[in-house]
Each structure stands twice: as C-alpha cells, then as structure tokens.
Image (cartoon, grey):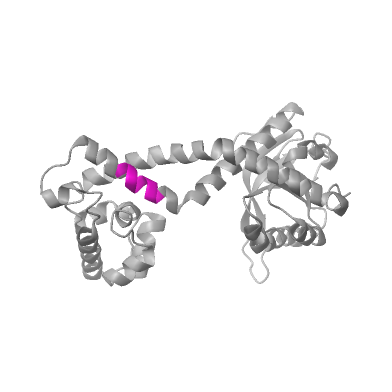
C-alpha cells in the first residue's frame, strides 16, 4: 500500500517543508562539520610538512613511502593544481596519480624505472610551484616559526576542505539521517543488531535493524552475485518466517539539480532487487531537502515510495 507516492496533492507542500528542514540543519550544523574536518585535516597537513622537511624535500622516497600526501602537495602550489593539471604539467602517468590520490598507494605493476622517473617529476613540479605567499620560509632559506607553520597548514587545509566541501556536508547529513532513523526505531521498541557481528540482511530477527548492510543481487548476464549496500534494514516485529525486511535508502540534497541527475540510481537499485527477490521487495526512500515534483514523479512511476524526514512517523505506515 502506497504512503506518499500516491499523494501528488501533498508533494509541493512536503517539498517546501523538507527544504526548510534541510536549510535549518545546514545553517546550524554544516559549519561545525566543516570545522571539525578542517581541524583534522590541518593535523594531517602538518604531518606532511614534517615528512617533506617543510616542503623543502619532496623526493622519490617520500612519495613511495607516503603516496597519500599528494592531495596536500597539490594544494600547496600557486595556483593550487587540479589532478589533471598536475598530470599534464609534470608529464606523468594518469594511473599513477589516480592510485596515489584515490587508493593512497602506487600502481603495483608499474615498471620501477618509470615509477621513479614520474615520482621525481611530481616532486620537482611541487617544489618549483610551492606557494611563496604561504611558505614564506622557502625564499629566506631558513627554518619557519611555529606560527608560520600553523598558518601555512591552516591555509592548505582550507584548500583541501574547500575542494571536498560537498562530500563533507553530505557525509554529515547522511549520518544525521541514520541517527534519526535509529532514534525512531528505538522509540518504537526495535533493537539495533550491531555491525561487525556478521548478521546478514535476511537473518535479522523480528524487531531488529541494522545499518549499511550488503544485499546480494543478480546482474543480468552475470552468474556471480553483486552486493548492493543499503543504508538501513529493518525486520518488522510481526514479520513471518521468510519475510523480507524493509530496505531504507537515506537521501538528502542541498539543491534541485543533483537529485534530478541521480534519480535513476534508486530505480536501478530497486530493479535489481526485484529481479533477484521478486515484487515483494519493500524499498523506501528517506528524504530530506530539495526533492521536487519531477523527482518524486519519476520515483513513484518506478514503484518507489518514501518517508519525509519532517514526517518520520510515516515509517509506522510501512508496517513498523
């Protein structure tokens, strides 16, 4: 039975209330989330300064030992270098830079002589382009003061956090949404099945729930199942033997553009689930933010229902 997907007469009002809720959270908590990340990042930047002798020695051995310092080094130049700009400017392997940035490691199959050559090029480029307005001690050729080091680390950390500001906010909002789901379930008498206990989505006992569980699905043309991560999985108290749990996907958005770009993701996920487990799969969205009628209409047409965070008690209408 549909709860919200069949009520287009309420979508406009619900969207307005949801936008208000998201904006209120953003104004109150987004700066704190950003500051906390910046403090942690500042410490990581200072560790990079120590490893590079305050940016005077960006050598091959350092980059081999600590490939993950590359994003910090890119943000230490004038101007700060985008990943592709560094690849082109230094004339190095794109795969090398991608592995260092995304995985914090070096390509295992890259020939040693090519690896050493490219790492040397990266180090030389960083040293040549180090920002003299930030690293004022480089032109003096003496040791920086503690204040100069702190100021430089804070500036580089701001650059790093600015480059990933949206993921920082998105991660904080996602955790807040999961906390809200957990609070509602706890108040309703449900118990959390702790992560790390090896519990599977179809082994939850009635009246229990878990976060970020993998659900295996069958892909067309592939014999090997693929795991789909689900934000929250809840087994209703009155569930019968063999009944599937309620699968909940937490979604938040700070603008209308991105949700319409990504609206097919939920449909693709639920179609895989239905192909594997049949039409009895119960999959709902938990929405907060900028979700307007075109997004909602698309999801409703795909048979996907949702709960608005500002009306979280609607979870009870899904048998919880």
Q: What is the x, y in percent for residue 1?
A: 89, 49
Q: Main secondary structure of the magenta part?
A: helix
Q: Quadrant of residue 270?
A: bottom right
Where the C terminus falls, by quadrant? Answer: top right
Please tell me which residue lies in front, 239 or 167: 167
State whether residue 165 is above or below residue 111. above
Q: Is residue 121 magenta?
A: no
Q: What is the x, y in percent for residue 58?
A: 20, 55
For the point 31% across and 44% down, the residue is 45
Asked if one can make out residue 245 in the rendered structure from this viewpoint, the answer is no
Residue extending furthest toward the front: 133
Q: Which residues are magenta?
A: 153-160
Q: Quadrant of residue 60?
A: bottom left
Please tell me which residue lies in front, 166 or 17: 17
For the point 61% across and 63% down, the residue is 224
Asked if one can make out residue 231 in the rendered structure from this viewpoint, the answer is yes
Q: What is the x, y in percent for residue 304?
A: 78, 55
């Amino acid at each position: 039975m549909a709860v919200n997907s069949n009520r287009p007469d309420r979508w406009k009002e619900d969207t307005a209330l949801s936008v208000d809720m998201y904006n209120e959270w953003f104004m109150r908590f987004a700066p704190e989330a950003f500051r906390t990340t910046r403090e942690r990042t500042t410490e990581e930047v200072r560790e990079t300064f120590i490893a590079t002798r305050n940016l005077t020695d960006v050598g091959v051995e350092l980059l081999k030992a600590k490939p993950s310092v590359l994003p910090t080094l890119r943000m230490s130049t004038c101007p700060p270098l985008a990943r592709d700009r560094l690849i082109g400017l230094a004339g190095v392997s794109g795969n090398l830079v991608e592995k260092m940035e995304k995985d914090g490691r070096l390509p295992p199959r890259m020939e040693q002589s090519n690896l050493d050559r490219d790492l040397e090029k990266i180090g030389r480029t960083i040293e040549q382009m180090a920002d003299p307005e930030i690293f004022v001690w480089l032109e003096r050729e003496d040791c920086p003061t503690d204040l100069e080091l702190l100021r430089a680390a804070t500036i580089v950390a701001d650059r790093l956090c600015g480059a990933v500001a949206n993921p920082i906010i998105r991660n904080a909002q996602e955790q807040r949404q999961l906390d809200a789901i957990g609070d509602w379930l706890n108040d309703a008498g449900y118990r959390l099945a702790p992560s790390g206990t090896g519990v599977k989505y179809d082994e939850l006992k009635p009246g229990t729930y878990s976060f970020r569980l993998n659900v295996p699905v069958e892909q067309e043309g592939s014999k090997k199942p693929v795991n789909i991560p689900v934000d929250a999985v809840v087994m209703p108290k009155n569930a019968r033997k063999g009944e599937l749990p309620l699968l909940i996907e937490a979604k938040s958005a700070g603008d209308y553009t991105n949700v319409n770009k990504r609206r097919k993701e939920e449909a693709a996920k639920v179609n895989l689930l239905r192909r594997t487990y049949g039409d009895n799969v119960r999959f709902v969205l938990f929405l907060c933010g900028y979700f307007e009628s075109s997004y909602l209409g698309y999801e409703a047409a795909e048979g996907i229902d949702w709960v608005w965070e500002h009306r979280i008690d609607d979870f009870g209408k899904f048998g919880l």
